[in-house]
Image (cartoon, rainbow, N blue to C red):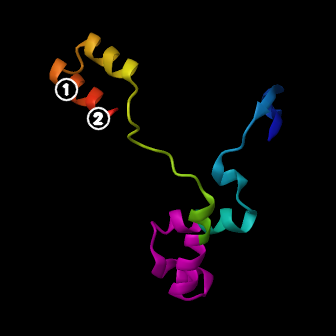
Amino acid sequence: MVERVRIAEKDIAIEGSFELPQLARLGLEDQVFITAFVRSHGSIKEMERVFGVSYPTIKARLTRIAGSLEFVETNPTPSKSEVLERLRRGDITAEDAIRKMEGLK
């Protein structure tokens, strides 16, 4: 948990209680590994070359890191009030709203 963030160049500080993003909570070695993975566009072959280890070693490390991260639902089920609001705005038809409401049961 972070309690103070300071931007030195601007002499600005923000205080409160901030939870670090998931990737920032990883250890430094795992952060370096994930950065290399992204920079290599997810190429395990490239990761083998960069780190000098085998395919199973790269896969095992990715699996371990993935297991420590919570995945964000990218298409969460809407609440009844959200369905009704979308219907009110005209974003969905009454039939769509009925189907969505039935799916919530």
Q: In the rendered image of this protein, does residue 32 appear above or below residue 56?
A: above
Decide: marks 1, 2 in contact (CB < 8 A)? no
Count neighbours of disc 2 (C-alpha within 10 A) and say few if under 14, some if 14 to 19, many if 20 or more.
few
Q: Total number of numbered labels?
A: 2
Residue 90 in the image: state x and y as whole percent. Answer: 22, 14
- As for residue 43 lying within the magenta part, the answer is yes
**x 59%, y 64%: residue:** 67
In terms of secondary structure, what is the magenta stretch mainly? Answer: helix
- Magenta span: 36-63
- Three-letter residue code for mark 1: Asp
Count neighbours of disc 1 (C-alpha within 10 A) and say few if under 14, some if 14 to 19, many if 20 or more.
few
Residue 95 in the image: state x and y as whole percent. Answer: 15, 23
Residue under circle 2?
A: 103
Q: How far apart are marks 1 and 2 (CA)?
A: 11 Å
Q: In the rendered image of this protein, does residue 16 appear above or below residue 38?
A: above
**x 52%, y 64%: residue:** 39
Residue 50 in the image: state x and y as whole percent. Answer: 58, 80
Residue under circle 1?
A: 96
Residue 61 in the image: state x and y as whole percent. Answer: 60, 75
Where disc 2 sits, the SS reads helix
Residue 69 numbered mark, or none: none
Q: In the rendered image of this protein, does residue 59 appear above or below residue 31?
A: below
